[in-house]
Image (cartoon, rainbow, N blue to C red):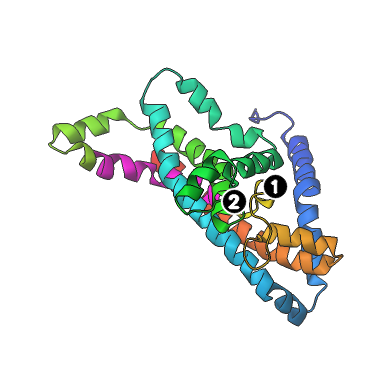
Amino acid sequence: MSHRALPGFGLCLGCSSAYLGLVVLVPLAALLAKSAGMDWAGFWGTVTQPRVLAAYRLSFLASLAAAGVNAVFGFLTAWVLVRYDFPGRRLLDAAVDIPFALPTAVSGIALTALCAPGGWLGGLAGRLGVRLAFTPLGVVAALTFISLPFVVRALQPALRGLDPEQEEAALTLGATRWQSFARVVLPALLPAHLSGITLAFARALGEYGSVVFISGNMPMRTEIAPLLIAVKLEQFDVAGAAAVAAVMMAAAFVLLAAANFLQLRSLHGRA
């Protein structure tokens, strides 16, 4: 007599599928249906307007910059948290999750107060001739803040799963510490690292609350795509908002598919 790993598998699968469809798939289908109501000329004209293209450009470039910053400093943070034991390590590890816990609007207000010309960091940057708040640089700062945990949390399990004997063997055979890191450690961490970077980029791409305050929301300059969608909804241009959102949704699907592929590759590599 065979036993299933999960009792009531059929019922559980049906409930989970129904829940997933109701919460995720139905809203996405409604979005696609709304954007499909436009003809191709209208859809293309909407998503290629100069203001829309400027919003896409800022969203994608700022998200890419934030993911790049976190690719370096997120890696260093994960490395320190896993490889070293020091006073306050657990507190630092918990602090990584603050962007998850804080409402995004609270994050945006705090960052704006910090980076504004009268703020502590904004005033310091102003003395150096750099303006943070209400500029694309402020958008990058907000996106870097909210996407950091994705890189750190993706890397920590991979770092813990590394066999230290491989590094010791490389050092015994005459490799320097840098050679051991570059040829033994880094290739093993690369799939998890790329997965974390991709998730950070996807998260930053759809961010709204933490950016809306610090950006200044100036069309063609500091207006991000999610804000433009909200503006179109306020103007009762539902079809236009759906068209812009459909492009963002397609980009998010591509990024999430890439992240899942990298995660599967990482799991197969450790198997």
Q: Amino acid at mark 1?
A: Gly
Residue on which the image places disc 2: 133
Residue on which the image places disc 1: 209
Percent position (x, y) of residue 198?
52, 51
Percent position (x, y) of residue 3?
65, 28
- Element type at marker 1? helix
4 or 209: which is nearer to us?
209
Graded by Cα atoms within 10 Å as few (under 14), some (14 to 19) or many (20 or more), the crowding at tag 1 reads: some
Most extreme residue toward the right is 236
Residue 187 within the segment the image draws in magenta: yes
In the rendered view, tell whether residue 245 sits above or below residue 201: below
Seen in the image, is 11 located left or right of residue 252? right
In the rendered view, tell whether residue 147 sits above or below residue 247: above
Percent position (x, y) of residue 127?
47, 48
Q: Which mark is residue 268?
A: none
- Element type at marker 2? loop
Instruction: Say which label, 1 or 2, has the lower sequence index.
Output: 2
Seen in the image, is 70 located left or right of residue 173? right
Q: Marks 2 and 1: in contact by CB < 8 Å? A: no
Q: Amino acid at mark 2?
A: Ala
Graded by Cα atoms within 10 Å as few (under 14), some (14 to 19) or many (20 or more), the crowding at tag 2 reads: many
Residue 142 within the segment the image draws in magenta: no
In the rendered view, tell whether residue 53 sits above or below residue 208: below
In the rendered view, tell whether residue 35 sits above or below residue 22: below
